[in-house]
Image (cartoon, grey):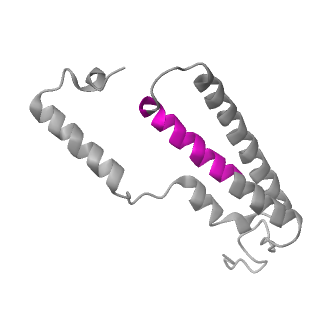
Amino acid sequence: WSSDVCSSDLTPAGRQAAIDWLTAMITEMPDEFPQFPAALSVLTMVDPDTAAGLISARIATIESILNGLRSEQAGLHVPRIYLLEDEYRTRSLEAESAWLAEVLHDIHDGLLSWNAPDASPHDPEGEQKW
């Protein structure tokens, strides 16, 4: 493995463009809003038991992804620098799973609770409630 693998065919202008992109992606925090935090912002649309089920399902999905990543990485014998992307993804998923487990625990213990609104967004008179 060598750093020439990815950059050997680049022109000087292409290499500079790649370095500019790399610099921006590593140093800047993009203005993005992933779907998961957006969904969390409206979690009160369902009752706590339903939310707990959804969170449990997400934890199971994360654990499945982590198991796959770990299996893929198990037999690799390459310098760590070439695995940083997978390492970052693994650590991010581990942190999300741990946080979700805390949220789930708090829901089950009643430390995190709310009253979900009716399934209908309108009251009997036809006025919008939310």
Image x and y of residue 20, in percent: 21, 45
The furthest residue to the right: 109
Give the left or right position of residue 10, taking residue 81 as reference. left
Q: How many marks?
A: 0
* Viewer-proximal residue among 54 and 65: 65
Image x and y of residue 104, in percent: 80, 59
Give the left or right position of residue 81, taking residue 54 as reference. left
* Viewer-proximal residue among 88 and 120: 88
* Viewer-proximal residue among 128 and 28: 28
* Viewer-proximal residue among 30 and 102: 102
Image x and y of residue 122, in percent: 72, 73
In this rendering, the answer to whether 105 lies above or below 94 is below
The quadrant holding residue 91 is: top right
Q: Main secondary structure of the magenta part?
A: helix
User: Does the segment drawn in magenta span residue 90?
Assistant: yes
Image x and y of residue 30, in percent: 37, 57
What range of the chain is rendered magenta?
81-97
Instruction: Kindly identify the residue that appears in the image at 69 percent across and 31 percent down.
Output: 67
Q: Image quadrant for the C terminus? A: bottom right
In this rendering, the answer to whether 120 lies above or below 27 is below
In this rendering, the answer to whether 18 lies above or below 4 is below
The furthest residue to the left: 12
In this rendering, the answer to whether 38 lies above or below 10 is below
The quadrant holding residue 107 is: bottom right
Q: Image quadrant for the N terminus? A: top left
